Amino acid sequence: MFSHSSSIFPLESSVSMADITPESLGSLSVPSRSPTSSTGDVDLAVAAARKSFDSGVWSKISGSDRAVVMKRISEGVKARRDVLARVETVNTGKPIEETEWDIDDVAGSFDYFADKAIELDKKQGSLVDLGMEEFEGRVYYESCGVVAAIVPWNYPLLMATWKVAPALAAGCSVVLKPSELTPVTAMELALICKEAGLPDGVLNVISGDGSTGSYMTSHPDVDKVTFTGSEATGKLVMSSCTPYVHNVGLELGGKSPFIVFEDSEIDQAVEWVMFGCFWTNGQICSATSRLLIHNSIKEKFLARLQKEISKVPLCTPQELLEGGLEKTSGRLGPMISKKQFEKVTGMIDRAKASGFSLLCGGNSRTPGYYVEPTVFVDVPTDSEIWTEEVFGPVLCVRGFDTEEEALNEANNTRFGLAAAVMSGDPARCERVMRNFRCGIVWVNCSQPCFTQLPWGGVKRSGIGRDNGDAGFWSYLEPKQVVKYVTKKPFGWYSPRFEDSKL
């Protein structure tokens, strides 16, 4: 089924803390009571989006008017911050301090793209110098139409916002499908939008699994498809867009490197390496899970890394809900589901069976879907654990001697989402940054993400960008207008042909 601003599943009737039971311990799997949508439901949602878009009730009003509603959406998110964060923790198994941060980013994203909508008004009809006085050229920017957005389970509401906020700012109508594992907060977003005054049909939230998403992306009345998820599913999404030549944006997987040079401060490097790989329980596409460390500091670094990892607790559901920002840090919850747990532990078990050197971790804990922070050292560069995205708290380490060697190995991947470098030499950081083949680079840190900057990758990590100017403009189509502004004849048709016998 689907919900838009006239048919909502309120958060309060969808989930409660009472749903945490001993049986769900560790998985934090909470029933959302949202059934899988039928193809008929998808048709209704797309029809609602198409009707609202074609009517101009949202697409034809000024960016400034859209911004007013979007600012109210931001305020609605802020007012529900605590409950939204708690539900995200229950649904995903992430510590409460992480989900509070996520919800703050959701509100900030709506504010940011509201400002972009205002800026858009100033750019409409901008004059372009054509170099010919007889002609005047102007450029207008129009909403790309009906957007089908499919988002993953690791950042449920934030990933939805990365699609919805820029699309709304641009004047699009949206059909949003959250993951079937974490649909609750997307439904709540629809309610917030209703209360903020978003017109009916502009945002439509669909519940369902991959079959629902497949029908959405191949729908003839959709104009743009935007997807965040795995490389394998991204290929299917791209293929489904070909019959109607849909505009498509894909943010896919990664296997990101982190190069640590010998002049790095060890304590700082250890913290950023841990954060870069174990944040969000390791379930993040940009995780810097391939560590390349200079051989001269490798042993000292690994000893300190092992010591600090031993301090990271695996938390029970109730523990994950305790604390909050500035109160707790450096703790892990469970994997999102049994399927993901089995994928991660399967890759760990195969690496162990291959005889790879295990520095720490490598075990799971029951009841629940817990995986210890795991570090393998000196694994072969052609091994599964080094080349494939694990999407769990697993770090692989190799040493290097030269900058060239480190860069060659960092770029030796089919992915190109992100990379990080740490060094006390600014010139070296600049060289390495310029030579990384990816869309995101962190210098002396890993994983900080800002709405103001474009997010996305190259190679098989995707097409296009979320966030920043690039993310906003991806929901707009430029229209060029050329006007002949002189009374003089153009001269292509000449009077000397008037007596032609042909």
Image (tube, rainbow, N blue to C red):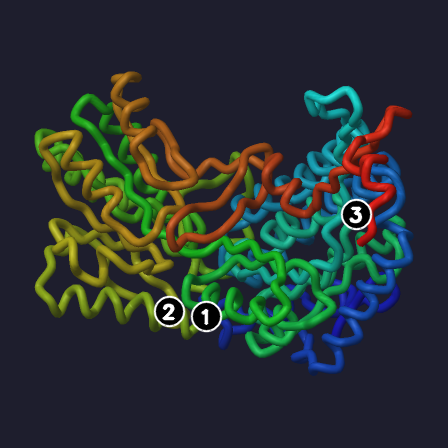
Amino acid tagged 1: Ser
State the residue in front, 502 or 78. Answer: 502
Write the residue at 76% across / 64% down.
204
Q: Secondary structure at mark 1?
A: loop
**Residue tagged 3:** 171
Label 2 sits on what residue type?
Phe
Tell me the mark number nearer the camera, choosing from 3 and 1: 3
What SS does tag 2 mark?
helix
Packing grade of label 1 (10 A; few <14, some 14-19, many >=20) is some
Please tell me which residue is depicted at 34% across the width and 47% down the height of the picture: 277
Local crowd size for mark 3, using a 10 Å CA cut-off: few (<14), some (14–19), many (≥20): many
Alpha-carbon span between mark 3 and mark 1? 36 Å
Q: What residue type is disc 3 on? A: Gly
Image quarter in which the C terminus is found: bottom right
Pointer 2 residue: 341
Q: Are marks 3 and 1 in contact (CB under 8 Å)?
A: no
Which numbered tag is attached to residue 337? 1
Q: Which mark is residue 470?
A: none
Residue 236 position in % (x across, y down): 48, 70
Q: Earlier in the sequence, mark 3 or mark 1?
A: 3
Q: Is residue 468 left or right of residue 423?
A: right
The residue lying at 89 percent from left, 55 percent from top is 199
